[in-house]
Amino acid sequence: MIAIPPQACGAGRMKPEKKPLHVLGACLLAGLILAGCAARSPQSAPEASQQGPAREQANGDRRPDARPDHTDQRQQSRSLASLQLVQAGRSLINEGRPDEAIRMLERAVNLNPRSGRAYYYLAEAWLMKDGADQAAEYNRLAAMHLSDDPSWRTRLRAQAEQIQDWLD
């Protein structure tokens, strides 16, 4: 084994380096930021078993450890945006602008495929363009999503009759 004398390494001659306070502060700040971004630790078994079924029932999720908060917020945002697009599409239909209404309503369906109202107004817009085949398909989709509401059932039935008149 080769021994290296302490003088060769500079031992004893060097003073410990002092770090400026702003470097230490920046490191501390970075550590705090990173700690805030870290994932939370999983729940202990008793807490998970107490909250799991309640969360499962409330969200319709079969996984008790699921974290639906962000998904729910995102879906609510998409539903709200879809509703606004449906209202804009309806206004365009009332203004006699079916092409623009169709574009608007198709965006609404892309955001919320369960929007029966968007399908209903798509059928209306296609009727304005003499597109009875497309209107019939959108009427069918609207009926799938709105059949539980009596006032919409009446509208859908009247729309279906109007479409049938076009097809005959």
Image (tube, grey):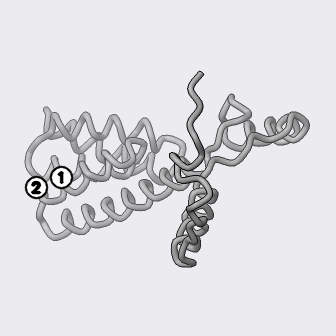
Comparing 82 with 102, the one in front is: 82
Quadrant position of the C terminus in the picture: top left
Tell me how many marks there are.
Answer: 2
Q: Report the residue at 71% width, 35% height from top.
A: 65
Give me the disc on residue 21.
none
Give me the disc on residue 102.
1
Residue 88 at x, y percent in the picture: 27, 66
> Do the CB atoms of the residues marked 2 and 1 lie less than 8 Å apart?
yes
- Looking at the rendered structure, the kind of residue marked 1 is Ile
Residue 133 at x, y percent in the picture: 16, 34
Quick check: 20 above or below 167?
A: below
- Looking at the rendered structure, the kind of residue marked 2 is Asp
Quadrant position of the N terminus in the picture: top right
Alpha-carbon neighbours of circle 2 within 10 Å: few (<14), some, or many (≥20)?
some
Q: Is residue 124 left or right of residue 157?
A: left
Q: CA distance from mark 2 to mark 1?
A: 5 Å
Q: Is residue 146 left or right of residue 134?
A: right
Q: Report the residue at 55% width, 51% height from top.
A: 70
Q: Please identify the residue farthest to the right as the structure is shown.
A: 46
Q: Report the residue at 44% width, 61% height from top.
A: 80
Q: Tag 1's secondary structure?
A: helix
Quick check: 11 above or below 19?
A: above
Comparing 65 with 158, the one in front is: 65
Q: Which residue is mark 2?
A: 99
Q: Please identify the residue farthest to the bottom as the structure is shown.
A: 21
